Image: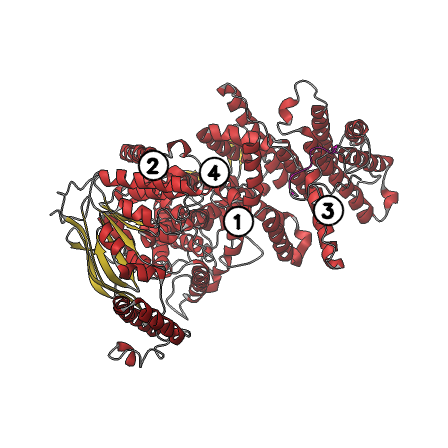
Amino acid sequence: MTTDTTAQGTAPDATAPGTTVLDARGVTMRFGGLTAVRGVDLTVGSGEIVGLIGPNGAGKTTFFNCLTGLYVPTEGEVRYKGAVLPPKSFKVTAAGIARTFQNIRLFANMTVLENVLVGRHTRTKEGFWSAVLRGPGFHKAEAASRTRAMELLDFVGLADKADHLARNLPYGEQRKLEIARALASEPGLLLLDEPTAGMNPQETRATEELVFAIRDMGIAILVIEHDMRFIFNLCDRVAVLVQGEKLIEGDSATVQGDERVIAAYLGEPFEGDPGAEEAAEVAQAEAHAAGTRAETATTKDTGTATDTATDTATGSTGATGDDATPGKENHR
Amino acid sequence: MTTQTTAPETPSTPTTGAPATGLIALPEHIGRALATAGALLTIAATFLAWTWTADFPGDLTVYGYPGGLQVLVLIGGALTTLFALSSYGVKGLGWLAPAGADAGVKLAALATFATAWYTVIAISVELGGVVNLEPGGYVVAATTLATLLGALALPFRRPAPDPIDPDSTGWEQFRHRLGHGWDTAKAVFAADAPRPVRALPSYAEILIIVAIMALGLTVFTYGIGTPYDELFVGFLIMAGFGFAALNKAGLIAHASQITARHQNLSICGAFLAAALFPFTQTDDKYATLGVYILIFATVALGLNIVVGLAGLLDLGYVAFLGVGAYAAALVSGSPNSPFDVHFPFWAAVLVGGAASLVFGVLIGAPTLRLRGDYLAIVTLGFGEIFRITANNLDGTSGPDLTNGSNGIASIPNLDVLGFDFGAQHDMGGFTIGRFANYFFLMLLITAVVVLVFRRSGNSRIGRAWVAIREDETAALAMGINGFRVKLIAFAVGASLAGLAGTVQAHVTYTVTPEQYLFAGAVPPNSAFLLAAVVLGGMGTIAGPLIGAALLFLIPNKLQFLGNYQLFAFGLALILLMRFRPEGIVPNRRRQLEFHEEADAPAALGKTGA
């Protein structure tokens, strides 16, 4: 258990396989009355690739932001290698968690190499005076940073574009550059927020290989994605987040087979919906026609849906869902 | 003219099939010949008398000896001739126009025309009528007009007009036509991308750099030494259009490529050229301007770290100059200073820099948590607070420190190692006066600021500044301590301004609160400092220096504008921001940022070809 937060060196953490890198317990994030993430537990072991999926608005990115210090969770705590994470995002990065962004956030007017060098910021120490005086230490550190940055660019396949401006790269390469930039901070855990969004199948496959290669460097990975094929190919474990709560966690087969997950993605009528009565009638008719087994399934599903409806109501108005769900906090 | 409405699906690409024609309906060879002949005749015309009386400044009455504005027209004529000959493909002149000579001919002809006609009109207006013109005046007006017409007959690639929507109203159609007219006007002076520089032997490149620096020094010295308004206006016209001509011909691009290859050498050369400036002056009159420009420019360069690199809009920057100046004044042994001490210069510099540093950190620590416009407003407030505080620390409204609005007067001249800055010195036959002495000292401070700017900009901390400017959230997620890095930028900028302030206190003899306004007619003030940075080019070294020189010289030379100075300044600022938002000396990054749409087709064209 290396509890020091100053991870040094590349692929640094020769943590024994099986140890927990990230341990989030009961993470809850409220924005005013809206609870975006509610009591989520998640662990990532070393050398593991964990997927986080869920429909739009399920709170995946909010949960990510809680992990990276952009938000401070309202309740719960996040531990990285045993130490509670500091509440500032730059300190989290220094501790060893790097991330990419859902909507690419490169430094558009800096060159590709400069982008990666910025990622090296936490692993270098040269301050203002060192930059002005330019002692031998400065040149050494700068050269080392450049070498490392070029290695990383080589790793993601952008070495020949080191001098291009980041904004001029095609979309897929911008994603790669973001990953290279994140790797430059020598993380023990890499968080990828929709790394294949907007990619074509070939690019997605290339990204898949890249993620495996990163895992082989000894870096644990937590990835948010909507591309199911990508996620089930890639991940050792997958957690499903629905309406801010963790629905299920397990390997690909378990998650794929779970009908609540399918329901969450495909959606279904819920109480309070304008057409709910008609839908219920139709469902009932269908249930009668199909027989008893189907009937039970429908009732179970509507049960989940009721919770969902309440959550939304709590967030927006807090008035409509009252009679539908007794014992919920929106009664205040 | 050729009104091809073909290819509406690719409106922006110039139609290559149609024959390129000139703006004036003359055959190309006649136009070219007319331009060349006109330029040669213009040169000849500058040796004639343009007016009969010496009442018009510069004495344009002498035959065979061009004076004042005639010299400018002569230079313009020579430039036009060279470009025209180069466009004929004369051997040995090809290097003049790496991007094609036609645009150069057009702009040089325009420069000559504008200067000559300005002169002729100024003579007529000031002396009361065209009767005051000698034949030479008519001749030069005719030859420059002929040159311009000939140059405009040179072919260019017309932009195809966008198809007109028949449903649009008259006003929309009018605007549409106006827009097309504007596109055409731009296309007249457009040039191709310059061909890359051939690899030259280093000694040749160094000679070229020396030549560039010498040219720069000459132009600057000429501008600063213009004794009367008309000559300065003529100089501005000539320099502006002449620079545009060189730029369009591709010479500027070549020059910047060559200087970029030998960066350190170029910077040393620029400093050497600047150091030679006092030797070109016979008295201290223009050295005064030189030292004030240098103070202004140095402070602007310090502000460029804060604004250009770290992207923090600071509207109260002049306060740091004031803190440095006050600190130096307080320890200078001035009778108005409550402290009865007289520090040596090196200690005063340290005190000034340190005081500004402390002040910068004190202001920065609470305000840098704000972003964007809010930061600008708060810094503006703190700048004013400094001035008002200095006004009130006079012993009646507050403790006696700054002597209130009277300021700290009779600051003694510096004396470093027995070298008295207040006295004249003779150096190798040149007399170096008081202001020239301070000019050299200030040049040293400028060198320090340039060094700090270059070295910090190209390092871990500089990259962190740019990253913060580009995207603060992403920068934080990359492990950059945003607040700390911004505070460093703020503090560095403040202490550099403080260094300049220590010299300023001694140059001006007196330090008063009214020297450090937010906006005023006399630079340096916060608004002008920011304008110098933005006009010159954010994030560059040369930009703020050139911007500051222009912003100081133009109000100083154009006294006749009087109360309209600030109005003219605002107008110039709007025009420049409209047509060249990246500033006079564009930063590589900024240029791409502002001309995204212009770059895209070029890149597409490359891949297509």
Q: CA distance from mark 4 to mark 3?
A: 50 Å
| 10 Å crowding of disc 4: few (<14), some (14-19), many (20+) | some
Q: CA distance from mark 4 to mark 2?
A: 52 Å
In the rendered image, the vertical position of residue B32 relative to residue B452, given as above or below: above
Residue range corresponding to the magenta coloring: B12-20
Mark 1: which secondary structure? helix
- Do the residues at pointers 1 and 2 share their chain? no
In the displayed structure image, the side of residue B279 where residue A185 appears, left or right: left
Mark 4: which secondary structure? helix
Q: Which residue is mark 4?
A: B440
The location of residue B36, given as percent across then percent down, is 77, 27
Mark 3: which secondary structure? helix
Q: Chain of mark 2?
A: A
Q: Which residue is mark 3?
A: B181
Q: Is residue B554 magenta?
A: no
Q: Is residue B556 visible?
A: no
User: Given the image, on which type of amino acid does mark 1 rest?
Assistant: Val
Q: Quadrant of residue A303?
A: bottom left
Name the main secondary structure of what is drawn in magenta: loop
Identify which residue is drawn at 83% across, 36% down: B142
Identify which residue is drawn at 33% across, 73% down: A284
The label nearer to you, 4 versus 3, is 3
User: Given the image, on which type of amino acid does mark 2 rest?
Assistant: Val
Which residue sits furthest right?
B131
Q: Chain of mark 1?
A: B
Please give the count of numbered marks on the rendered protein.
4
Q: Which residue is mark 1?
A: B534
Q: Which residue is mark 2?
A: A156
Q: CA distance from mark 1 to mark 2?
A: 38 Å
In the rendered image, the vertical position of residue B509 relative to residue B200, given as above or below: below
